[in-house]
Image (cartoon, grey):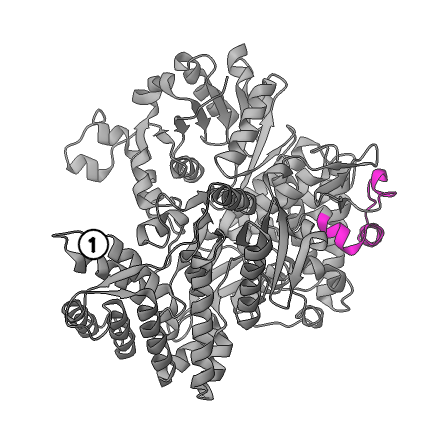
Amino acid sequence: MKRRIKHVTVLGSGIMGSGIAAHFANIGVQVSLLDIVPFELTEAEEKKGLTKDDKAVRNRIATENFEKLKKASPALLYSPKFADRIKIGNFDDDLPKIKDTDWIIEVVVERLDIKKSVYEKIEQFRKLGTLVSSNTSGIPIHLLTVGRSDDFKQYFAGTHFFNPVRYLPLLEIIPTHDTLPEVIDFYMSYGAKFLGKTTVLAKDTPAFIANRIGVFSMMDLLHNVQKLGLTVSEVDKLTGPVIGRPKSATFRTADVVGLDTLVMVANGVRQSGAEATNNFNDVFALPDYIQKMVDNKWLGSKTEQGFYKKVKNAEGKSEIHGLNLDTLEYELQGKSSFPTLELTKNIDKPIDRFKVLIGGKDKAGELYRKSLGALFAYVSHKVPEISDEVYKIDDAMKAGFGWENGPFEIWDAVGVQKGIELAKEAGYEVSDWVKNVESFYKVNEEGQSIYVDKDSQEYSKIPGQDSFIILDNIRKNKTLWSNSGAAIEDLGDGIINFEIRSKMNSLGGEVLDGLNRAIDLAEKEYDGLVIGNQGTNFSVGANLAMILMMAIEQDWDDLNMAIAYFQKSMMRVRYSSIPVVVAPHGMTLGGGCEMTMHADRVVAAAETYIGLVETGVGVIPGGGGTKELTLRTSREFHNDDVKNNRLRDAFMNIAMGKVATSAYEAYDMGVLEHGKDIVAVDKRTQIKTAKMLAKSLAEHGYTQPIEQKVKVLGKDALGMFYVGTDQMLAGNYISEHDKKIADKLANVMVGGNLSEPTVVTEQYLLNLERETFLSLCGERKTLERIQYMLQNGKPLRN
């Protein structure tokens, strides 16, 4: 029997409970979010004359946390309107309603006695066969079900989400010996297919997988930082994006998570005795300075000071000071440079940097050798204790801690034997099973990842790959063409993929040449084209450096030709004879957004941050974006409709450089279209889904589209826009240059110098768009904006 999840009850509305509730709401599930009834009235409630029996009082804790959920930044909800899918309540009044829920998720305080008391109440009302799970991060799962009924035990497991739930894709599934196999399969499948999670089956061991490895790695650094004489900011520089880790690196991550949480996990592992048989136990012991920080309640963001603290300088300006671990005083930490890092500047992929980093002769090199040696030794001994397979450990670290590469992948990158040497230098011995391993991973002839089995030393296929196409795996044998910025790969079944591979996936001449080549090839020899990549972002837009150079040199003819070529390329995406499906994800800005908007279909990752942001660099969308949003708006015009309002909304999206914070917001902005474009909650499935969609379109009689006509509103609408920009300037909402850009944008969107509403061609609007783009490139303030963006990575409002 297939299990459908229509309603979920989340017990506990704190940070994790709210995050879990929000993510279920994100995928369309109705949620009840419950918490305890407050023990006392607040002063405000007493002044209102409320009593403990009033529903508002009884729901207060859940209500307050629900309000925080709605205001969270970054947002927990894909769209603010999804909050309507969550209903709040309290344990005393609303727990009986769980008889009608499909899944009960307990997220109360991390105390065994409290959790067990909640389960006792659940059993009073729970319908037989209803799923029950706990989000505990540290309590052994088997202890939670002691005293519960057989049916409760059979449908119970640990479902350990990571915070923030929307953004960290790991979901650890921890069954007990009593959990039914089909229930385990359901949790694993549902987490991946519906919640978009990397679901990892974990054993019921202390801290499970990700926290066990992640906290070991962090604690090892905490012990080494003083020995190496490094500051907290230096360690964060060395352990962040340069090695494929989040920007928060080590110490900023500890501040965000909370030092008390880190200490709780470390103490839990140490006290469990799980590391008693080797010298890893000492790593989980707290360094003296950590204990002092805990005693002082310097726990990080929650107490407004931890390893970092915001302070006011002599001029009254805020500065971030780092903690001196020797003196326990906060001080401004200057910029540092390491020769080892300089050697990796031209190595794009973090995984390719490790061989260079471990050879460094400075403190950086020493830190990498020590920390990686300890990590390699540790993970070798955790197989099979916490996982029977190496890929589960790597998946957990990538999905739960935001590591670009897992420890066994990094070990492969430096070489298995070299990793064994690093472990010895760090004072550790690796597990015997590793000593004869050639590599932990390989790619088979079918382009699938295979991993080494600990016991047999044979290689097996990593399960679940049938849902994915991994471009890194097929690139070697399936690349049909490539240049410095792009590649074309054969996805099979008559579909090819165009992959942008330039720096930041920017759209320059080499990318556009590749795109046109891909369309030519698809039209002659294939059935369809996918445009997708598996980098961090889809595309940050046009090559600004090229535009700036041409504008400074006043090479207007070449710049005009370059913009016309961009427009022509986007129109080929729209009007080719084969279906084109674009798969955006991450930052999809400017030209990346324009490419997306011209596709036949879009398969967008839920985490797609898309928008036409060109006004931030002093121009308007010049690759068809202004034309396309104008066209889409004109389709919505109806008789007796207030057409100006619809056009104004589209205008404001461009003029303010609005970026959708999810694919669902992109629908509201008109960048994605309902009934045509779809959302993939699991980004890993995008290329495969896009391929299937392109194939389906081809098989069902795809016909080359005909260019469309656009109704523009002329001078009457232009007057409305001018009044609006005058008011915004008068109110100091925009600058003089912002107004100039906005007025020129409005002129394009109304069709230019037309006395009345008129039907025009797309090319007419493209010409207006291009002329306006060129004219703005001649403005000094626009050149200042472009240069500032190139130098600082953020817009200048001049």
Looking at the image, residue 94 sits to the left or right of residue 596; the answer is: left
Q: In which quarter of the image is the C terminus?
A: bottom left
| Residue ID at (84%, 32%) | 456
Q: Is residue 798 visible?
A: no
| Front residue (pair 196, 671) | 671
- Magenta residue span: 409-437
Asked if residue 411 lies in the magenta stretch, the reply is: yes
Residue farthest to the left, as pictured: 640
Residue at position x 50%, y 65% in the image: 321
Would you place residue 22 above or below residue 367 in this image? above
Query: Could you classify mark 1 by the number of other residues whose Cα lies within 10 Å: few (under 14), some (14-19), or many (20 or more)?
Result: some
Relative to 535, say whether 748 is above or below: below
- Residue type, numbered disc 1: Phe
Point out the residue furthest to the bottom here.
Answer: 553
Residue corresponding to mark 1: 637
Measured as percent of width and height from the top left, residue 473 is found at 69, 49
Secondary structure type for disc 1: loop
Whether residue 340 is visible here, answered yes or no, is: yes
Q: How many marks?
A: 1
Q: Is the magenta stretch mostly helix, strand or loop?
A: helix
Q: Position of residue 641 (x, y in %)?
A: 14, 53
* Left or right relative to 310: residue 251: right
- Quadrant of residue 754 within the rendered picture: bottom left
Q: Where is residue 713 in the image (x, y as percent from the top left)?
A: 19, 65
Question: Which residue occupies the foreground of this view, 495 or 115?
Answer: 495
Instruction: Report the front residue among 53 and 489.
Output: 489
The furthest residue to the right: 436
